[in-house]
Amino acid sequence: MQVKAYSFHHPLAFWIGCVFITLGVLSHIPMFVHASHMHYRMVGMPMDNTMLTGMALIPVGLLLACYGLMPRLALLREDNCIAAIHFHVADNCPLNWQHCKLVIALLVAVIVDVMKPATLGFVMPGMVEEYQISSESIGTLALIALTGTALGSILWGRLADMLGRRAAILLSALMFIGTAICGAMPTFTWNLVMCFLMGLSAGGLLPITFTLMAEMIPARHRGWLLVALGGLGTSAGYLVASGAAAMLEPLFSWRILWMLGLPTGLIVIALNRYIPESPRFLVNAGLGKEARAVLQQYNGEIDSNDDAGESEPDTVSSGLYRTMIGSYSGITTGLLGVGVAWGVVNFGFLLWLPTNLRDMGMSAETTNGLLAESGFFALPGIVAVIWLYHHWSSVKTLVLFVGLTAASLMLYCVFELAGMLTSSLIIFSTACLLISSSGVIAMLIPYAAEIYPVHLRGSGAGIVAASSKFGGILGAALGVMGLFANLALSALVIALPLVLFGLLLLKSGIDTRGRRLEDIHADFVNKANL
């Protein structure tokens, strides 16, 4: 039995699962349409039998799709060619049309992934009004969503190392589709449940996308394309979310923003033919024939004679704990620490900044204008990150932007203590913080996807992605405790650990720019043995 680059292991089960999930979501549309005369207010409406049937179809569809994607590795390894396969040719070949199609497909996946949690900020005001809940209760929604994304990053990262990168991406997209029914939930409690499941799906798609791209793109183009994918995908995701809110919410209420999970998720499924399984994962799983098929399609030829490289299935045990011990303990600690600190900055310090500025006497209009100007100045920062990551050094660029983030936080501390926190200095400090923190998150997961070996790459990228979400949970908790009411103190509390973790990254990390993934892994092993 042979599996082609874009085939499914049990195609009938996969496509029936897709149909069940889609029908399950569509079964919620009639009640949504029936509420049009109330501007789609569905609060308190009882769920009819059609909706309940649809809710049952979705988990059944997910199970069928999971079975359809699940590889029968023992059977596939029988009579399978696992002669030495190396990636010298693949890593040195120029970008071709196959690579371009892959990058476009994965860019769409990142945009869809970012769009879903970004929508959260646009649906919350409508939820407060329709469900008549307090600001504290609606804050629970954000907390549960962040918890879901953190757990999802870990879960899907592990699945990617067990079942494959392609399977994890498609399963995440299907779960993404299923959570579109969030837009038809008549109670806030059901929204909390669905929002948690949405977080599970959204949290997993991003790190696995970077993992697959790191293993497919030639070495000399890998770094800058990974960072560009993160920066452009994130920006476009927020743009799509805000554009959809501006155009659709006035017509169909906040609920339509959740329902967009159906068409956007189906787009990712439709692009599956441009998303192959990683040949490095296939080699590691002992599926040499399948790996050769992918390499020949993307690179035209393969290298099977050189004695360097990763050619045999890796017998080292995998698992999350393997990323935290041995040669990877230092770099994992540094990346996790930076991820948590970034989450506190983004979901804590910056989230509370408008409130603090208003407490200082600024109007809401002035505050929003200042933050908008700061965000505009931050846009060129991604271009600088891409250039430095590609032309200077990957790890030094990451450390540089970690240091700039800490320095930007200290500006708030210094200016407030000196009584100099004027509008112009606020714009300057906030622009610096947005530029530097955006640069950090644009590099954090791509760097993680480059440094871990093939049997740990999904898990490593997953826990690093999860750390930023955990930082968001911590930031929300610190906000409730009142830390961010003191601008100078909160800036100092975040900046000091950032400096320490940045120094740890500088000590433990290595430059990945233009290097083969197998050589990067060998360097970490040699570094640990010194």
Image: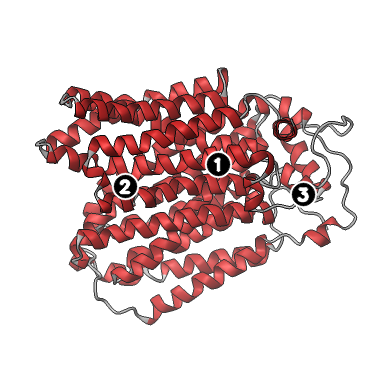
Is residue 101 placed above or below 397 in the rendered structure?
below
Q: In whole angstroms, how far apart are the C-alphas of marks 2 and 3?
A: 46 Å
Instruction: Report the amino acid beneath label 3.
Output: Val
The label nearer to you, 2 versus 3, is 3
Secondary structure of the residue carrying tag 3 is loop
Residue under numbered circle 1 = 333
Nearer to me, 4 or 505: 505
Nearer to me, 363 or 530: 530
The label nearer to you, 1 versus 2, is 1
Instruction: Report the amino acid beneath label 2.
Output: Ala
Secondary structure of the residue carrying tag 1 is helix
Residue under numbered circle 2 = 244
For marks 1 and 2 on the same chain, the one whose residue lies earlier in the sequence:
2
Residue under numbered circle 3 = 316
Q: Position of residue 474 (x, y in %)?
A: 37, 50
* Residue at the image position 67 percent from the left and 52 percent from the top: 161
For marks 1 and 3 on the same chain, the one whose residue lies earlier in the sequence:
3
Secondary structure of the residue carrying tag 2 is helix
- Would residue 408 appear left or right of 208 to someone viewing this image? left
Q: In whole angstroms, how far apart are the C-alphas of marks 1 and 3?
A: 21 Å
The label nearer to you, 1 versus 3, is 1
Instruction: Report the amino acid beneath label 1.
Output: Thr
Q: Position of residue 47 (x, y in %)?
A: 33, 78
